[in-house]
Amino acid sequence: MVIFPLSKINIGLNIIRKRDDGYHDLQTIFVPVGWTDVLEVVPSSGEKTTLRVTGNPCQCPMEKNLVIKALRAVEKFCGDLPPVDIFLRKIVPDGAGLGGGSADAAAMVEALDYLFGLGLDKRKMAEICSTVGADCPFFIYKRPELAEGTGTTMRPIDLPGLKGLNIIIAKPPVSVSTARAYAGVVPSGKELDFESLATLPVKDWRHCFYNDFEDSVFPEYPEIKALKDYFYEHGALYSSMSGSGSAVFALYEGDILADSESDMLRGMAVWTGSIK
């Protein structure tokens, strides 16, 4: 079975408070985008599960790879499974705030359900995914979701203004540690009405949606801020760092003026597409 795991962008990321357990309460909107990895899972030709990773360099040991963690999570819920051969081609850059590894994990759960007829519905698959990573359940539903709490409490949200817009995502040759980004963030201390804000025209989002990680990330990585500024200078309706970075996306109505051949974007991982 072959699956193309989607990635995601964040519309706004409001860090409300740090909790007693060390996690943070937040608000954000996850939106799926079509920059994908490729995951193939087939019954094993041998006696043990194998994993082969190609594409972007991956130094992660097999048992720490999120697709293997997803396999172990499924076995914890469903019992031992026959061995499989896993082929993962990494295309979505890591350390970008795009959820590539989480998407791969969710796709692994879907693949195992299909291959072995486990009969898992989306809710059960999302429950299993939540034990792997906070944003993994989003990639089971593959629709815009308003995420709250630690990011695992989600509900669908309608974003009519996004339909048909073009998008460009670029990742500079730097990676931002999620742990370090959280360590530097200053919680806003207030909740926002994301559902009402999302109904505003996309061109107005730059004045009401904000990624709180940018305040601490931009001073340390000025090239990320420069990328966001560049997109606005080239006609973006809305631009933001995704998640804790380092990727920046921009939404355009009509042609994307900041094309992937520009001097600014040279040497970066770049993807362009449209919002379905």
Image: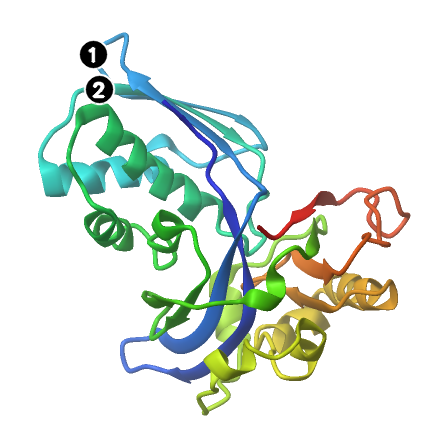
Q: Position of residue 148 (x, y in %)?
A: 37, 74
Q: Amino acid at mark 2?
A: Pro
Q: Nearer the viewer, residue 142 or 190?
A: 142
Dot 1 lies on which element? Answer: loop
Q: Position of residue 183 (x, y in %)?
A: 49, 73
Q: Amino acid at mark 1?
A: Glu
Q: In the image, what residue occupies the spot 27% across and 76% down?
A: 21
In this rendering, position of residue 200 left or right of residue 222: left
Q: Position of residue 24 (x, y in %)?
A: 38, 76
Q: Which residue is mark 2?
A: 83
Q: Position of residue 177 (x, y in %)?
A: 53, 59
- Marks 2 and 1: CB-CB under 8 Å? yes
**Vertical placement of 52 versus 154: above or below?**
above
Q: In the image, what residue occupies the spot 72% across and 44% down?
A: 270
Q: Nearer the viewer, residue 60 or 43?
A: 43
Numbered mark located on residue 47 in the image: 1
Q: Looking at the image, how many numbered discs can be counted on the residues?
A: 2
In this rendering, position of residue 258 left or right of residue 43: right
Q: In the image, what residue occupies the spot 57% across and 32% down?
A: 57
